Image (cartoon, grey):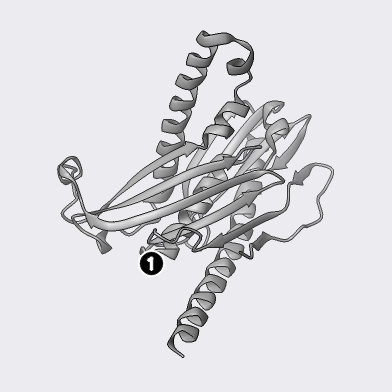
């Protein structure tokens, strides 16, 4: 498997910094309609798989507007070894801490899936698959910051790989305020030590913003605007890289079909 770069290393200033590299690939899960693998930073690794469209179940059929638009069913989880390594309390705090860690991870997974769904629904054209559902399953394989952003990128690539119609590719970047400096796509240590964190998902080609989430407090409205602009700039560059990855995947698939037909 040859992973392609999403972003090239670029110069940074004293005021802002970004973490590279980011790499990705598509068509990594053979049984899925579409799939993608994404790496952010040095160690964060996320995989997404898409199944469907297929007839919606009873609960989905009851959703308002399903006759005109299909629905996304999004789930997200961390691999067991990731969850265990991420929870120091489960190692040192006994059974009670382990149970608390499991509850926290379950809550984190539900929140991640909800954020992911919000970021993707604005991009996907549900009218292309009425009365049907598309399942998006995201797995965090390794975590060292940027998991939410990597999940959006992986899921968007997987949807495109599956041929699901969308207004644009959904890109996502995080920004942290660390010791007075804005950091684009912070790693785990930078996120943990940040005074404020911002997550921004966007549709760069259409100019749409599908999600902005802020934790902590930036020092001024101007600094918050600068963080948003930094994230949007990252999303725009990321989208260009995502497009290159999809084109390379399509060319590889076409070449495979041609070789198979010989």
Residue 75 in sight here: yes
Q: Can you give x and y, in whole percent of width and height, for residue 93 in the image?
A: 60, 10
Q: Quadrant of the N terminus?
A: bottom right
Residues 64 and 162: in front is 162
Q: Can you give x and y, in whole percent of width and height, for residue 262 in the image?
A: 46, 91
In this view, 202 is above or below 254: above
Residue located at (41% from left, 59% from top) = 159
In this view, 250 is above or below 210: below
Q: Secondary structure at mark 1?
A: loop
Q: Residue furthest bottom?
A: 262
Residue denoted by label 1? 163
User: Quick check: 14 left or right of 4?
Assistant: right
Residues 27 and 151: in front is 27
Q: Can you give x and y, in whole percent of width and height, for residue 98 in the image?
A: 52, 15
Residues 238 and 105: in front is 105
Q: Can you give x and y, in whole percent of width and height, for residue 221 in the image?
A: 63, 34
Residue located at (45% from left, 81% from top) = 257
């Amino acid at each position: 498997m040859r992973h392609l770069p999403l972003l090239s290393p670029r110069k940074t200033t004293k005021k802002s910094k970004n973490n590279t590299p980011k790499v990705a690939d598509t068509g990594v899960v053979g049984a899925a309609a579409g799939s993608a693998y994404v790496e952010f930073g040095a160690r964060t690794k996320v995989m997404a798989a898409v199944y469907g469209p297929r007839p919606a179940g009873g609960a989905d059929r009851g959703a308002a507007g399903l006759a005109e638009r299909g629905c996304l069913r999004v789930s997200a989880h961390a691999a067991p070894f990731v969850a265990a390594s991420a929870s120091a309390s489960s190692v040192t705090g006994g059974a009670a801490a382990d149970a608390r860690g499991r509850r926290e991870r379950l809550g984190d997974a539900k929140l991640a899936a909800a954020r992911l769904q919000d970021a993707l629904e604005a991009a996907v054209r549900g009218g292309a698959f009425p009365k049907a559902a598309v399942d998006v399953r995201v797995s965090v394989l390794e975590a060292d910051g940027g998991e939410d952003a990597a999940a959006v990128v992986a899921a968007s690539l997987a949807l495109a790989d599956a041929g699901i119609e969308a207004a644009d590719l959904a890109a996502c970047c995080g920004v942290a305020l660390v010791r007075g400096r804005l950091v684009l796509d912070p790693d785990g240590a930078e996120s943990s030590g940040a005074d404020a964190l911002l997550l921004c998902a966007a549709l760069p080609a259409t100019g749409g913003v599908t999600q902005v989430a802020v934790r902590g407090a930036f020092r001024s409205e101007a600094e918050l605007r600068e963080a948003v602009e930094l994230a949007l700039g990252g999303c725009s560059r990321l989208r260009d890289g995502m497009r290159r990855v999809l084109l390379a995947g399509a060319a590889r698939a076409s070449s495979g079909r041609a070789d198979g037909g010989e």
